[in-house]
Amino acid sequence: MKKAILGISAYYHDSAAALLLDGEIVAAAQEERFTRKKHDSSFPISACRYVLQETGIDFKDLSAVAFYDKPFLKFERLLETYHAFAPSGFTSFLSAMPVWIKEKLFMRRLLSEHLSELGDSRKVPVFYPEHHLSHAASAFYPSPFEDAAIVTVDGVGEWATTTISKGHGKNIEILKELQFPHSIGLLYSAFTYYTGFTVNSGEYKLMGLAPYGNPDAQRTHDFKNKIVTELVDIRKDGSVVLNMDYFDYATGLKMVNEAKWEKLFGIPRRPAESDISQAYMDMALAIQQVTEDVVMRLVCTARQLTGSKNLVLAGGVALNCVANGKILRAGIFDGMWIQPAAGDAGGAVGAAYAVWYIRDGNERHLNGDADAMSGSYLGPEFSDKDVYRTLQKYDAKAAYYDDFSRLTADVAARLAEGNVVGWLQGRMEFGPRALGGRSILGDARNPEMQKKLNLKIKYREGFRPFAPSVLEEDIGDYFDIDRESPYMLLVAPIREDKKIPLPENYHDKPLYERLYFLRSDMPAITHIDYSARIQSVSRKTNPRYWDLINEFKRQTGYGVIVNTSFNVRGEPIVCTPEDAYRCFMRTEMDYLVLGNYVLDKKDQPALAEKGDWRSEFKLD
Ligand SMILES: [Fe+2]
């Protein structure tokens, strides 16, 4: 009988479950996709049920459960004793601690209660690899490398915030660790907060805003200077020491001391959803540059300490694809691989791997050049029968295509006409990016596409850029990059011959004028600094998506389309055909493809809904 290990990440941020069968990752999903609550941190009961069902494994037959974090055992005992004798003292002590510690204190008990809901858990051993070991394992074991330098940098507060390790074969050796509260991830999150975005999900927006900052402005230089002299001491090896006078997150109440920040930077915290002035763009650029500097120092240290020519990354900061692109272009490493679920969700995969290789000592065998994530298509899949049932339920009108090449021909033609198409095919992606399993697609050449997608489909901030999907074999024809980027985690410039130069006084023009200046013949995916966050599509891991883009290329000459996640702002990416149909009907999307069915918006009956669906999702 094969050995099955259930990996779980829960209780802090982005819960998830993953299943490892004889060392091979066969299923993984985030809880938010089932509960429809973005970044759901509750016990991932639905995700656990899904990965077990996908593989036909009964809970009692698992060889182990691996939890991505270590409860504070001794601490828990100590506190329980304290509690028994001094309840009021205990309360005041607790309120002085970070919120996340409180949750961890009772994790072990909580976990066993939740596991018993899945089945008889008495005979299934539970292991607790350390949080950062789980991240490190998620970066190294599925990578295509026999040996690698492993760098994990977390976005949110834990004891270890940054680690450097060496991975070799089945072993991981942690070499360096930076401890809470000193954290480059938290520094970035503090700026996410101060620029008016939501911590833990708005970091992406801050990164997207940075290129609107003026690199030549005195203000940008001043901001940077203030960051590195007042807020953080950056050491040569990439470790950081934060000046805690400016931060409040250690007590879990607020990110920063706003009065001090306002005095230091001369601008108040931007109220959420208010207009973004140039000062906040300059601030975004300043913190992005500081972060890149720290990350670059860290990976250089990792190179020195490990001697390895390969780098693997995980942890929230590894989702900073701009920094990743810079590491790649710096040429410090030959090989580079980033866990697609780099945040805490990926800890579920890492924890399971840690048990399989480190605890059980199994040998590791590489899979040639391929990584072990199967394109990250590790979630639920739905048959045409499932789709049919959804269509019936909503009385939806759809055309069925027996022949998939006829479908791609029609859909590619609709895209080329400027339509926006929802696309649900095969297994759902694991990790924060939609990679052609649950995506919204458009024509990258269309100058109106970015505006249309942001304002009429996603209902989100107009400045936010979109990413291209490109045929893997064509990546070098459009972008200045020498390798594939299957997980949309690398930013690279578009090719020189595709660029349209900026007009004079460009930086003095208002944001939206700058935004809609056409920078290339693929304006919808060319970011303000001529870069793009690229996904290369492999025929092997996603043949249907590859076929569509290939057909689009046959019709238009361009093997590139816009790919954005299938959701509206604040909503988790859709999972089921029903989620997709609802999202399709709530937005101004023109067509929807569900497996072999194609739906035209014009043919659909009105969607009967109680109340305003916009109140269903909290804006992120
Ligand atoms: Fe983490």
Image (tube, rainbow, N blue to C red):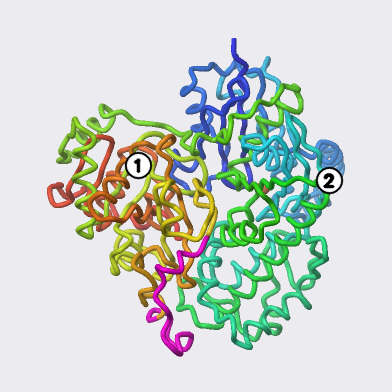
- Of residues 562 and 30, the one drawn nearer to the viewer in this rendering: 562
> In terms of sequence position, does the residue under pointer 2 or pointer 1 come before the other?
2
Q: Position of residue 20 (x, y in %)?
A: 59, 26
What SS does tag 1 mark? helix
Q: Position of residue 211 (x, y in %)?
A: 52, 73
Where residue 522 sits, quadrant-wise, is bottom left
The segment highlighted magenta reads 492-513
The label number, if any, that marks residue 545 in the structure image: 1
Rendered residue at 30%/39% (across/down): 578
Q: Is residue 389 above or below residue 61?
A: below
In this rendering, would 228 be left or right of 276? right
Q: Residue at x 51, y 49 (%)?
A: 485
Q: Residue at x 39, y 41 (%)?
A: 437
Q: Nearer the viewer, mark 2 or mark 1?
A: 1
Residue 245: % across, % down: 79, 72
| 5 is within the stretch colored magenta | no
Q: Any mark on residue 175, and which?
A: 2
Label 1 residue near ligand 1, CB within 8 Å = no
Q: How many circles with numbers are drawn on the protein? A: 2
Q: Nearer the viewer, residue 162 or 88?
A: 162
| Residue 395 horizontal side relative to residue 101, left or right | left
The quarter of the displayed image where residue 400 is located: top left
SS class, disc 2: strand
Type of amino acid at the residue the image marks with label 2 = Leu
Quarter of the image with the N terminus in it: top right
Q: Indicate the amino acid at tag 1.
A: Tyr
Q: Residue at x 50, y 64 (%)?
A: 493
Q: Is 238 above or below relative to 382?
A: below
CB-based contact (under 8 Å), mark 2 and mark 1? no
Where does residue 294 sit, x and y in percent of width and height?
A: 73, 64
